[in-house]
Structures are given as C-alpha cells and as structure tokens.
Image (cartoon, grey):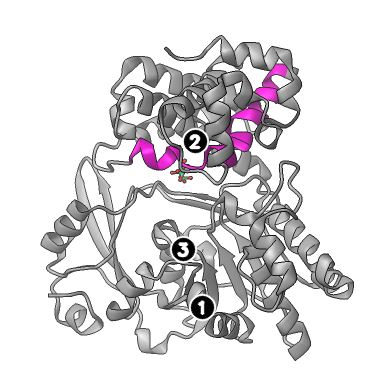
Amino acid sequence: MKLTPDALARAGTIERPAYDRADVTPGIVHLGLGNFHRAHQAVYVDECLTATPDWGIRGISLRRPDMRDALAPQSGLYTLAVRDGAGTAARVIGSVLEVLVAGEGLGPVLAAMTDPATRIVSLTVTEKGYCRDGAGDLDQAHPAVVADLKTPESPGSVPGLLVEALRLRRAAGTAPFTVLSCDNLPENGAALARVVRQFAALRDRELAEWIRAEVAFPSSMVDRIVPATTEADRAEIAALTGLEDAWPVVTEPFSQWVVEDRFPAGRPDLAAAGVQFVSDVAPYEHMKLRMLNGAHSTLAYLGQLRGHETVSDVMGDAELAELVAGVMTQAASTLSLPQDELSAYATRLQDRFRNPALHHKTAQIAMDGSQKLPQRLLAPIAEAHAAGRPWDALATGVAGWLRYLERFAPEDPMAPELRLAAAKGPNAVLDLRAVFGDLSDASWFREGVLARLPA
Ligand code: CS2
C-alpha cells in the first residue's frame, strides 16, 4: 500500500504526527527541500505542531521536480528511518505541507514567500547556493547573479530570490520574514546577510537599507548525518512499515541544532523540541565544521583513493581511523570551547562515523570540495600554524583532495578549472586562489601539503 494520509490512518502501530494535519497552516518557507531538511529541521518543526499548528512548512525545490513528484501524492507525508546497529525505527513526519518547484514557475513560490503568514524562510541550499567569491562577497561574475541582475523580478539565484521576495513584501507593507540559514558555513546567517544585502544594493539602495535595518539573519549550527536514499532503503522501510514511501529519508539517532535567538517575526517553540538557543553560535559552528566536517572531507578523499565505499568502511581501516582522530584533535586545538568538552565530542563523532547501518557514501561527501575545504580544513590549518600547533593531519586531508582530483571526475561547481589544474599537477591546484586564498602564496603550506600526498 502506498503512503497516503488515508493509508496511514488505517496502518498499524507506526509512529505518526500527534496533531491533526487539517489544523496545520503554513508559517515557514524552506528553500532546498532535500533529505537533510527532512531529517533535521522538519522533524523539530513536526514536534512543535501540536502546541503551535501555525508553523507548517512549504518546501521549495529550486530546480528538480523529483521531490515534489514523490511527496505530492503522499500529501507531503514521508517516513524518517533512524538507523544504528540496534535496528531501524520508523516514524512518519507531517510538517511539510506542500512542495513547489521554482524552476517550473516563480509565481507560486513568490506568493508563498510574500504570504504574511510566512514568518521564517529557512535554507539548505548547500555552500554553492550562496554565490560567494573567495572573500565571502557576492560573486558578481556568477552566471546566476549576472542573469538575476538583468531580470531581477524573475530570479534564479538564492540571493536574487530572497531579495525579490523581500522587495515585494516591503512594497505590500508586509513585515519581513526572518531568514534562517541551515547550511554548513561558519557564521552562516551573517554570510547570507552579506550576499543578500550586496545583491539588494545592486538593485536599489533603499531596499538594501531596509533589509539591513529590518531583516534578521540568525546563524545556526545544524548536525545530523543523512545519506542519500537508496532503493534498498525504500524496500526495507516498506517492509518495516507496510507503507510504500516514494522517498523516505534515512538518518542516525544523533541530531543537534544550535540557533541564535533572533526571530523578530516570531518562531515555533523549538526549544521544547530540543533546539539549543544561544546568543553566539560561532563556537559551535566552528567546532562542528572543523571536527565533524573536516574529518568527513578527509576520510572521503582518502577513503575514495583506497576504494572504501562508506564512512564506516573507512573507520574499519586502522590507519585512516587514526588519521580521522588526528584531524579532530588538531581541529580542536584551534577552538575556544573547553578541551574536555571537545574531546568528548570527538569520541562521540567517531562512534557516529562507525554506525554500521548508515551506509553513508564517501562519494557523497567528496562532492563540492572547492566549496567545503576552506572552512573545514584551510582555516584551521592557518590558525594552527599561526599558533605553532601541529596541522599535519589536516594537511593530509587537503593532500587527499589533490590526489582525488587527479584520479576522479569531481562533482563540483569549479569542476572545469579543477580538472584543468589537476591535469598539470598538484601545484597548479594549489595556485587556485578562489579555493586557497592567501595560502596559495604560503610556502610552508604548499610544502606541508605536498609532503603528504598519498601514493
Ligand atoms: C558531510 C555533511 O556531505 C558532507 O559534506 O560532511 O553533509 C555532514 O554529514 C553533515 O554536515 C552532518 O551534520
């Protein structure tokens, strides 16, 4: 039987929304409705809907229609399968009310974003969605930005879309929404505010001023490991629940969301669902990006080179498991949180990476290296070096990427440049200032990385 509201009502014991979905109205628009959002923010929101049903989610897929096509026949319902060595626990999530596809027409998307009921626009659009240059400014040469500046009322880029929605709200006298970044970038709220304000200033100075004065961009640290869904997952979950879900999502038991509490237009009571509200998210973002994601990228490249398909396979390779621990220790040495807290965090991370049931593919993490390495490995290398602390494990991750680029065709927005450079050799890749910034000129860095190139 296919997963639908009727089928769920007749199904056995599967855990499901505790609220009546008929009472739920939209309050959040989410840009980039992928698996990560569905296993993370949408689950926290699901837990708030009993107390406050006016925070349902309208999801936007920027380009591809496949998520909408999967979820529309299910009225937005989907199965969350939480897996570890002990087994799989399935639960049906009801917080996503509908999915719109921006690439098929902006009318409904802008209508949702300008609806006064929409008080939060959250995002998981990945690093490349921010259209930043190497210095963190709006990349004015980015093709999507160039196109949006020509036709700003039909935007295709994320900054362009946010600015157009905010412009329309201002013109209609509607208060702005809060913009909540949930991507893996340090100070992600400030990073997004910067490109949005810069884009707005290129359109209209007054609009840019209004955005600066009125729109909040809280930062948030998001953490949950969410592999891509496979056919085997679909079959296992259908067997477990008795309901065929076109696109279930598989994840680990662990979940963390640390959010800066700046929501002038209001927010659901996410603290009751386990979200940590703090005044400064930066220390948590740095911890997570450098220790978890830095180790992830390292193990992805070295793992790919050794033919390890999944993260848990890499953790079964003693030499690489030791390298992963070393990356965490060296990353921790650059962080401001108490070292005992950080070493407990590292132990827990290594347990998560060993989860045998998750099948998290190294190839998935290896994507978009040019967008990920700066905050995950390069920033901690620069800081560790400046402080006279060891950074060789971190450099091994960078060296792994260089070797990976020689042997694999990368999925990366910079793929053409990377392929050209890699064909000339690792030094040519290290010359790419868009990735390495000033480190391109640092001989200590170049020598340190080249000395660690894997065979
Ligand atoms: C991973 C992340 O694919 C990647 O780059 O490092 O998606 C990672 O699984 C999440 O950030 C965990 O919270």
Q: Is the residue marked 2 within 8 Å of ligand 1, measured from its CB?
A: yes
In terms of secondary structure, where does tag 1 sit?
Answer: loop
The 10 Å Cα crowd at callout 1, few under 14, some 14 to 19, many 20 or more, is: many
Closer to the chain start, of discs 3 and 2, is 3
For disc 2, the marked residue is 292
Secondary structure category for the residue under label 3? helix
Instruction: Provide the residue designation for mark 1.
Output: 55
Residue 236 shown left or right of residue 57 in the figure: left
Q: Amino acid at mark 3?
A: Ala
| Quadrant where the image shows the C terminus | top left
Q: Helix, strand or loop at disc 2?
A: helix
Q: Amino acid at mark 1?
A: Trp
Would you call the spot at circle 3 few (<14 residues within 10 Å), some (14-19), or many (20 or more)? some
The tag earlier along the polypeptide, 1 or 2, is 1
Q: Which residues are magenta?
A: 361-385
Residue 164 sits above or below residue 452 on the image: below
Is residue 402 on the magenta stretch? no
* Circle 3 residue: 273
Residue in front for this viewpoint, 132 or 171: 132
Q: Main secondary structure of the magenta part?
A: helix
**Between marks 1 and 3 in the image, the one whose residue lies nearer the viewer:** 1
